[in-house]
Amino acid sequence: MEPMKHLNLHLLLFFFFFLCVCGAICTAADTGPKILSPLEKPHDGNHETKIGHLPFSVDDNIRKICSKTEYPEVCLSGIVPFLDGGKDDPPSVIQMLVKATRTLALTTQAKVKKISEDPSTDSFTARMFDACWGSYDNSVSSLDDAMKALQNHDAAAMNSFLSAAFSNFGVCDDAFSEGGHGSPVHDLDKQLEDLVSNCLSISSQFMVKN
């Protein structure tokens, strides 16, 4: 019986040691430094954010402009489909971002309409989307006005219209939040807000006057 007792004791000690080691590893993992993605890093607008490798080629000056926005990679990826003959000045970058925002707004609105008209959509979601669907029309109208103001070299008016578009992009999210739910198009609305934020950031930093 004595050998069996020693064996049981050894097994118990080994099991305790194993639990301690596992606990230490888990604690170290939890308390280690958090690595932030480029979109999570705080940005004060006074410093450039280093942009990593992207699967497309972009003019260095455009990279520099986007690096000083709040969401640099959203800035770059948004304007790529609208790159216009090598134009890389701040007003041209804003123009490309507004076009990208307008395109995504219409895509989001179409998705909202499709979900609200789907017979399988629950009544709450359909009701919320019916109520906020028109906010995308208002946003697109504001973006069109912002583009006209940019072409007229009126930075103050442009910023006002961009701010109006930003507010309208949050209408659906707010409606769902008040009902205790998350919007099915939250990610798209967030991307729209990020694009507009970048436009406002470029305008304020580079003072569009030309």
Image (spheres, grey):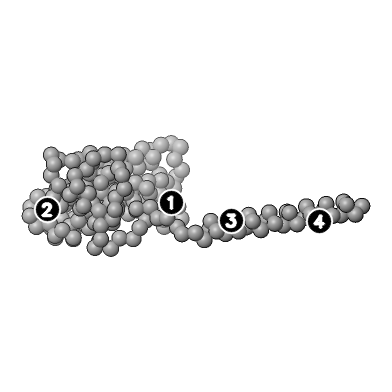
At which x and y percent is residue 66? 23, 52
Residue 82 image position (x, y, % from top left): 19, 40
Mark 2 vs 1, N-terminal side:
2
Q: Which residue is mark 1?
A: 182
**In the shown orientation, is residue 92 left or right of residue 117?**
left
- Secondary structure of the residue carrying tag 3 is helix
Around disc 2, counting alpha carbons within 10 Å, would you say few (fewer than 14), some (14 to 19), or many (20 or more)?
Answer: some
Q: Residue at x 11, y 53 (%)?
A: 149
Residue 6 x/y as whole percent: 84, 55
Q: Which dot, 2 or 4, sits closer to the camera?
A: 4
N-terminal-most mark, 2 or 4: 4
Q: Earlier in the sequence, mark 1 or mark 4?
A: 4
Q: Which residue is mark 2?
A: 149
Tell me the distance, in whole angstroms, between the alpha carbons under discs 3 and 1.
36 Å
Q: Are marks 2 and 1 in contact (CB under 8 Å)?
A: no
Query: Which residue is label 3 attached to?
Result: 25
Between the C-alphas of marks 2 and 1, the distance is 34 Å
Q: Mark 2 falls on what kind of element?
A: helix
Q: Residue at x 46, y 59 (%)?
A: 33
How far is the residue under mark 1 from the one under mark 4? 54 Å
The percent coordinates of residue 71 (x first, y second) are: 29, 53
